[in-house]
Each structure stands twice: as C-alpha cells, then as structure tokens.
Image (cartoon, rainbow, N blue to C red):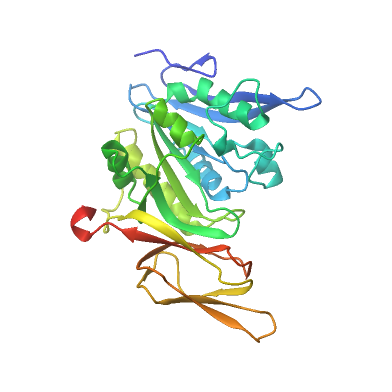
Amino acid sequence: MARFYILGKEILPGQSVELSMDVAKLHTHTPVQVPVFVERSLKDGPIVLLMAGMHGDEINGMEIIRRVIRKKWNKPIAGTIICLPVFNIFGYLNLKRELPDGRDLNRSFPGSKNGSLASQFAYQFMSQIAPNVDIVIDFHTGSAQRSNIAQVRCLLSDPISMELARVFNPPFIVHSGYISKSVREALNKMGKKILLFEGGKTNSIDETIVEEGLLGIQRILNHFHMKNFKLEPTESEPVIIKSSRWLRAPQSGVFHSVVKNGQYVEQGDLLGFVSDPYGSTERKIKSNTKGFIICTNEAPLVNKGDAIFHIGTALSPDKQA
C-alpha cells in the first residue's frame, strides 16, 4: 500500500488517529488547534474528507459529522475517511459566523501563512489537509434566519461533480458557480472534487436536514465501496435547479409565510405578506416567477429589501435525467 501522510504524521493501514491542525495562537501563546479524525482501512481506496463548521453558527453540519463518528461510519472497509467536524473553532465557541477578526473564513482561501487570522486558517487547511484528499463534502446551512431546503450545490457543467451529486441524492441539486476565495474555488483549482451540502438555518439542529446529510454520506461511501450500508432504494430523483433569484421584502414589518420550503409555485402565487405591528397595513408578496422555493426566511420581523424567498428554476423535464 502507498504511504499516507497528513498533518505531518504517517497514517498506517488500519490505523485510527485523532490529530490537531495548529492554526494560530492566542495572546497568551496558547495554541488554537482544530481536531481532525482520520480512519484508514487496510485496503487502498479513495480519501474522503467530511467537513463542517466553516461558519461557527452552522450547527447542522457539525451534528451530521458528529453522528458519523459516533456511529463509527467513518471506519472504512477501503480507503480513508477524514472528519473535520468543527473548522472555525472561534466561531463555534461564540456561535458566530465569522472569526474574531470579522472575516468570513469561506472568503479567505487559499490563505496566507502570515495573513489575517482567517487567512491563516485557510492556509493551514490548504497546505496540510487539502493536498491529501480526493473528495470533499462540505456541510453548510443558510445564514441568519434563512432556512435552506436540503440541497447540493455544484457546477452543472462538471460531469464528475454532477455524478457525485446524483449519488448523494438530495431533494435538490442547485447550479452554483465558484465564488472567489471560497474553499470550493480553491479546491477546484487544486483538482479536487467537492460537494457543498446546504440545509437548514444557523444555530439550530433540523432532524430532517441531518437525516438527508447522513443518507447522502452513506450513498457516497457505498458508491466508492468504502462501506456497505444497507439502504432502501431511492424513490425519487433530485430536482435540478439551473438558476435562482431572491424575492425581497417590499416593506419593513412582521413577516408571515404561507408556503413551505421545497414547494413549487407559479408566477403570481401568494407566498406571504408583511404587515405593520398595528394592523393598519399589509402587503401581499406574490411570486414573480415559477419554480421551487429552495430557501425561506424564518425571521418574524424583516426590513425592506431583506431576502425572504429563494426561488429556483428547474431544468426542463427532458434535461433532468
């Protein structure tokens, strides 16, 4: 078998190791370490990274990977599974999206050894972990009170990514280009394949979303013969979203939605309304296009211009397959 090194340590066949990625130091010289769990099989195979907590308040992904480790699903019969449950340790401790320097870690790649705190986090990941993996599944949620329906985001024109997304089999596959300085863009430039799973909202655990994430992981590991989970045959295919647009609040006030995440709507359908707290005004919100609701704002109060519904336009039925 080929020799395998990560974070400066050789991982032997059949070995189970908990490592630490040193990313920075506190003012007190105390090192900040990100736990990384590595399970290598006795047989060669793909190296899969499951990661979450890029944003410290996105708890669903952390819970998905926690359960994977707890259930020992990260012990492969072939290949290697690496689990990084909480990337942004600072944000996780403070239940905040950003790092203490106010920067978004997912807009700081590929990073710099002597740059900002976020840049140092990104640099350590790109230099010590990313070169050693083949496939990455990165778990996220909607930001603030915006709740995403379970979805995988990838480039529809990339046949390998699309194949993996179909294997994962979420309710929706959403076309998403590479965002500058994101981990997706950085890994793509490195020649790695990454699926970005989105589901739920910040600072909450949604059991439906967690189950979708766990099923997707099982399907991917089965696909690469890294595990042998007994799964029920899938009864439905993902809806493929080719484009999307946000519908925004027409005024500030109390927000009421009358549609559900994942629901199909026609142009002109009533989606909800915004009213003032005194009962004197009420503005209806109607869909300006036809498509699927892939994200809803669950905040009870909104400001004019806030994103409240994300509506995705699906590929035509003949192109879905």
The residue that appears at 38% across and 29% down in the rendered structure is: 192
Residue 280 picture quarter? bottom right
**In percent of the image, x 53 and y 24: which residue is there?**
17
Q: Residue furthest bottom?
A: 280
* Residue 254 location, quadrant: bottom right
Q: Is residue 97 above or below residue 37?
A: below
Residue 208 is situated, as x and y percent measured from the top left of the image, at 46, 58
Residue 13 image offset from top left, x and y in percent: 41, 18
Name the one closer to the observer, 119 or 55.
Answer: 119
Q: Residue furthest right?
A: 28
**Is the N terminus in the top left, top right, bottom left or bottom right quadrant?**
top left
Q: Residue at x 53, y 42 (%)?
A: 66
Indicate whether 110 appears above or below 314: above
Q: How many marks?
A: 0
Q: Position of residue 175 (x, y in %)?
A: 36, 48
Decide if residue 228 is in sight here: no
- Residue 305: x percent and y percent? 58, 64
Q: Nearer the viewer, residue 304 or 213?
A: 304
Judged left or right of residue 289, residue 19 is: right
Q: Is residue 229 left or right of residue 319?
A: right
Residue 107 versus residue 266 in the image, above or below: above
